[in-house]
Image (spheres, rainbow, N blue to C red):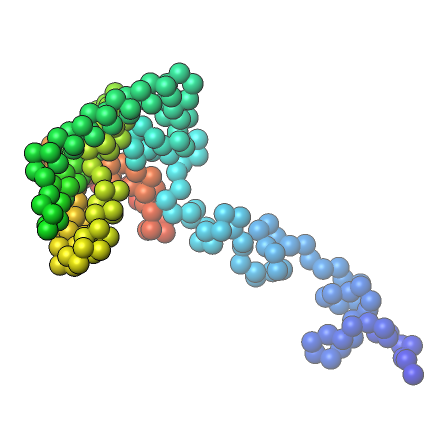
Amino acid sequence: MSGSGPGAGGTAGGDGSAAAPGDRDGPGRPAPPSRPGERGGPGAAPVSRSGAGDGAGAAGATSAGRAPRAVDPDVDLRVPEQRAEAAGRALWGILAVVSAGGALGACARYGMTLAWPAPHDAAPWAVLVVNASGSALIGVLMTLVSERPGVSPHPLLRPFLGTGVLGGFTTFSTYAADVPELLARGETAHALAYAAGTLAAALTGVWAAAVLTRRALGLHGGAAAETGPGAETGAGNGAGTGARDR
């Protein structure tokens, strides 16, 4: 049998008292409006729209109205000025210099393999030298192109020398085909030494060349690392503003 007194049909409160239908905080008292930023009533933590959750802004985000800095000044499509370099007529210029540079680099590699042919019972060590030296030159080139403060190289320099000449000179496709061939001939020791040696020599070459080039130019660790978005916004420090002091 249902009750007919006050509170009948209402919802029970946390202390056992009954509240009138539609009431939340007592009879005839409407629920208080939520404060700005609150979602769960008084005392609830504000919810950030950006998902940062700390009220300081997302770490590493660029300032409003500022285009993100490019790591490679020729191919960063996030920057409108650089994106225009690979559109319209400019695209054909890039394709032309990449093609010309690739032809020169491939001819240089072919000449290297002719001057140092691989014996039938040995690994093609000339290809290892090509990949190691080419990787080192890439380290030098990219440091000169992207890490010198205040220097803007020609937009076709990196496509010609990097993608074209050095991209055609180095050959990891030949390296990948040589390893199974050595294994098929039963030359396991040569195959393993060639496979591991090429990777180690290429990675060491590009790292050492970049480090030595930075020291020669007095960059001390690389100017690009200190001019990226994280350097100005203090990525990872929770404040979003700690610019790095020099």
Report the residue at 85% width, 73% height from top. 9
**The image quarter in which residue 115 lies:** top left
**Which quarter of the rendered picture does the N terminus lie within?**
bottom right
Q: Residue at x 17, y 58 (%)?
A: 186
Vertical comparison of 192 with 218: above or below: below
Residue 14 horizontal/vertical position (percent):
69, 76
Q: Give x and y (percent) for residue 202.
A: 17, 45
Farthest residue toward the bottom? 1
Residue 23 in sight in this render: yes
Residue 238 location in percent, x, y? Answer: 36, 51
Q: Nearer the viewer, residue 223 or 89?
A: 89
Q: Quadrant of residue 68?
A: top left
From the viewer's perspective, is residue 140 above or below residue 7?
Answer: above
* Residue 190 rendering spot, x and y as whole percentages: 13, 55
Of 166 and 85, nearer the camera is 166
Q: Residue furthest top?
A: 89
The front one of 81 and 6 is 81
Left or right of residue 20: residue 203: left
44 or 220, nearer to the observer: 220
Specify whether residue 143 is in view.
no
Quarter of the image for the C terminus: give it: top left
Residue at screen point 43% across, 46% down = 57
Q: Quadrant of residue 189?
A: bottom left
Q: How many discs appear?
A: 0
